[in-house]
Amino acid sequence: MSDRSSVDFPLREAYALVSDLMTPDPRIYWADFLFHILLGWTGFIVTLQTTLFSIEQILGFVITVFTFYRSAIFVHELAHLKKGTFQVFRWVWNLICGIPMMIPSFMYDGVHNDHHKRDVYGTHLDGEYLPFATQKPIEMVRYVLLSFILPLLLVARFLLLTPLSYLIPPLRKLVWQRASSLTINPQYIRAPNAIRNDHYWWLQEFATFAFAATVVGLVIVGLLPYQALVLWYVTAVCVFILNSLRTLAAHAYRNPGDHSLELAEQYLDSINIPGNFLTTLWAPVGLRFHATHHLFMSLPYHNLGKAQQRLVNGLSDNSLYLKTIRKGLWDALKRIWKEASIASISR
């Protein structure tokens, strides 16, 4: 990272342009989430009850995947909302989205915040960062393919490891450290105090176990068709694939992990993809402005687009700011693939 990048970035000027946009609007959160999660469950039922591979089923499945995906991404907002706020929203999100999808909010709460710390971002301690741009391109392929087993690992974590961990105390500690975080770095170890809002995380854990056990039990006794489990798995795989591709397009992933980055450097190692309506499908809830989010992580998702416009048009020198912009998902993925290919050849 050049000295100009870290020293000359107009942080104070940028903050002055967006400082009035830091307050989240609960009405937007509730309306957005409830509309999409209810549409998602409706699509799930339609997909389950219609003829296999019919137009109605395909349409219902597509709606289910994208609406569940958008609903699930609200876990990112929950990780950033001010302590003690949106508590009812948090419980409702968990009950009708997080728990049924095996991703209760405690899996991200207190974990994602490390990703934004100046002394952690991009280092080996960062659970959400791997130096993909300096590794062989095949590592990115492996990461995406992991989406096919992640749903099964989550079910195993809550259905099997949760009760076992209470019977075997040493396993309890291991489950917390290595199987209780939504991260991409397999070496990440969750700290004992990595909790920010979800102090009753054990209730979420038990509820997720109870949900999984109930669903499996209903299938076994014939009260719920096994196709519901198949559909849940296929939907979850598609959601994870979408998220893995979005994750690969979220950062430049150039830091080898041996040193920390200043805030401006973190921003310049992150990606903005303003795009269009289609961009909001694969990068929902403000994540298409990921670099701007890393610059001002307190900005609520519904104000990120407005902040982006102000920064592009209002900065006296926006040349550094514009360096983070990509034309689309393909552009971002192509660039990181090319960098990884060059890096692997030059070794």
Image (cartoon, rainbow, N blue to C red):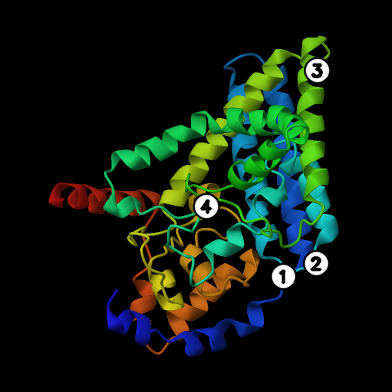
Question: Closer to us: mark 2 or mark 4?
Answer: 2
Q: Quadrant of residue 96?
A: top right
Callouts 3 and 1 close, C-beta under 8 Å: no
| Residue found 71% across the figure and 75% down from its top | 23
What residue did someone put label 3 on? Answer: 217
| Residue found 70% across the figure and 27% down from its top | 160
Residue 308, image x, y percentages: 50, 73
- Circle 1 — which element? loop
Q: Is residue 224 visible?
A: no
- Identified by mark 4, the residue type is Ala
- Circle 3 — which element? helix
N-term mark: 3 or 2: 2
N-term mark: 2 or 4: 2
- Circle 2 — which element? loop
Reply above or below: 206 against 303. Answer: above
Dot label at residue 24:
1
What residue did someone put label 4 on? Answer: 283
- Identified by mark 2, the residue type is Thr
| Residue found 45% across the figure and 55% down from its top | 129
N-term mark: 1 or 2: 1
Reply above or below: 45 against 220. Answer: below
Question: Closer to us: mark 3 or mark 1?
Answer: 3
Reply above or below: 135 against 194. Answer: above
- Which residue occupies the foreground of this view, 75 or 317? 75
- Identified by mark 1, the residue type is Pro
Circle 4 residues within 10 Å: few <14, some 14–19, many ≥20: many
